[in-house]
Image: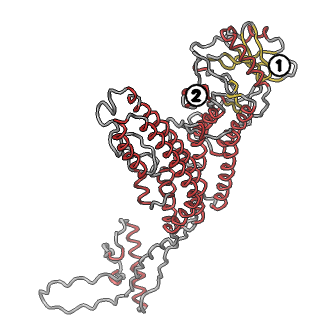
Amino acid sequence: MSESNHATPFEAPDAAALAPLFPGYLVECLIATGGMGAVFKAVQNSLDRPVAIKILPREFGQDQEYRTNFVTEAKTMARLNHPNLVGVYDFGEADGMLFIIMEFVPGKTLFHSAHGIAIAADEAARIVIGVCQALAHAHEHGILHRDIKPSNILLDEQARPKIGDFGLARPVGTVLKDGETIFGTPHYTAPEVLKYPDSVDARADIFSVGVVFHELLTGRLPAADPRPPSLIAGCDPRFDAIIRRATHPSPELRYSSAADMAKEIGVVAAAAATHAARLRAATPATGGRPLPVRTMPVASSGPGNAAGILAFVAVAAAIVIALLIVLRNPAPPPTDAANATPLVTPPPAPKPLPPPTIESVQRPKPEPEPEVFKAKPVPEAEVVKVNPTPVVKPAPPPMPTFDVPGFLDKARSITRQRAAPILAAHAKEIAKNFSAFERRVKREVRDLDKITRGFVETKTEDNLEGWRKDGNRVPKSMELPGGDWRGGRGGFGWGKDRNNGFFDSLNTIHAEYLAKQQKIDDQLEVDMLELSSSIYLLGLRKQIERLTDPNEVPSVKQIQAEIETVQASLKYFIALMRGTDAKAARAAAVAPPGDGTDKNKDG
């Protein structure tokens, strides 16, 4: 039983008061307490090894049936020997309290170490593999845990997981007695534990492990965020398929054993590690692609044409004087140096000879003043002409050369070849289920009295014909293409007792075959999710790795958009595999389901 489910907390005795009850042990301190008892740390004197002693409340020891089950289960768990299971050394009764002596694990629980934190995918996989292997060992010995959750998984000093607290454990196939309370932890407990507690088997523990795996990868419970972990945390999408299968509502569609789940996680984790190593090897130490080296243009500094020495000297002298003036009276630089006109004139020369002026520096030719009187034209100083630097237009960026549409078409074609047998098997099972449904319905109609039968047979055939055209699918409602089967408020054959149970029987038949159809559709989803992860998305990611040219960034974005669309909508992927073009498949994936249309009809 879960500690959180017990009504009143257990009042643990003091370590000193407990010591006389265990003369072979040195009881050191209380570790934890809860509704299911208290755990003390102690040292076994004979072997000088640390142990954990769990004391159960006295009322458990007073229940003879519980005592019998406790002894049976303790003996079974003591026979378990696995590195990822907390070992059981001894059990018994002391002063009316049942106790169990276990391996002491120095460290924290997985809950205390990783609650609300998304840990690295390889670490999450390693922990869950250890948990699965431990559960497989327990299941082989006929023991279910029934309360797998982070707080019941300990991490030792090497961060190895160890499953503890088998307080809810019971032998496989144990029948729940009338009035017996069903315990567990919300969000971790498999749905069948609450609906069909008598039929619970190892797949209930597998469901809980799948929830834990999702939580480790994302830091969130599936109930809080049901999106695939790859969309939340960016992990390998093949983990999505594993978690989806482990936590499937139908036990028949989960892993048949924890060992199978551990094996598949190991395969994906190894492939993901290889993929990451290749990326690290192909990526520079800076963490990204090297940027293209860009050089700045260098301007030449020679004069544009041959000028006289005096002009050249005059220009140089003018520049020197102008610099001295600017340094003495600094001013902000002009915004357009090419078209700027000097605003500073040199001071009067102290000597008779006038100093060189800056008039010899090239400047725009002044506009002629209005002619008021004629005067001799003043010859202008020879101007040094400088050819302007030609403006070089930047070359357009190179266009990507990779054919993304062609690549996606080829990738879809290859994946469709793998999907064809899956879709064919699904269609065959759907048709087989509908044929059985049709036979049962017609048999019920034949049992009606002659007065009612004729009209009902016509309506029956109309409806069945419509459902055949709708893909041999059992409808969600019996009131589909042919109209209401009852024909009126009183139904067919009112007043005759033999027809009164007709609609009840019809509803029972409909519910039975609709449930079978749902299981067939669920299996299709599981198979197609695995196919999308292992074939299609994997191929797209490998192509992204090959597109290392910086000019192919647009191509990479297009392929990444396709990856995200497939991850977000399994319906989109199934529509692609059925041959629908991408645009129509994308529209179908976001369209709301119509009345009477099964959610899986279009993928």
Residue type indicated by callout 2: Val
- Location of the N terminus (image quadrant): top right
**Which x, y percent locates residue 463?**
38, 45
- Taking the image as shown, residue 5 lies to the left or right of residue 267, namely left
Where is mark 1, residue-wise? 44
**Which x, y percent locates residue 473?**
45, 47
Q: Residue at x 66, y 39 (%)?
A: 256
User: What's the CA distance linking mark 2 and mark 1?
Assistant: 38 Å
Residue type indicated by callout 1: Gln
Element at label 1: strand
Q: Nearer the viewer, mark 2 or mark 1?
A: 2
For residue 19, which numbered disc appears in the image?
A: none
401 above or below 532? Answer: below
Q: Quadrant of the rendered structure where residue 452 is?
A: top left
Q: Quadrant of the rendered structure where residue 143 is?
A: top right
Question: Marks 2 and 1: CB-CB under 8 Å?
Answer: no
- Taking the image as shown, residue 349 lies to the left or right of residue 63, namely left
**Which x, y percent locates residue 597?**
40, 46
Quick one: label 2 or label 1, which is nearer the N terminus?
A: 1
For residue 193, which numbered disc appears in the image?
A: 2
Q: Residue at x 29, y 31 (%)?
A: 489
Using a 10 Å C-alpha cutoff, classify the residue at mark 2 as few (fewer than 14 neighbours), some (14 to 19) or many (20 or more). some
Pick the front one: 80 or 66: 66
Element at label 2: helix
Pick the front one: 504 or 94: 504
**Which x, y percent locates residue 66?**
68, 14
Using a 10 Å C-alpha cutoff, classify the residue at mark 1 as few (fewer than 14 neighbours), some (14 to 19) or many (20 or more). some
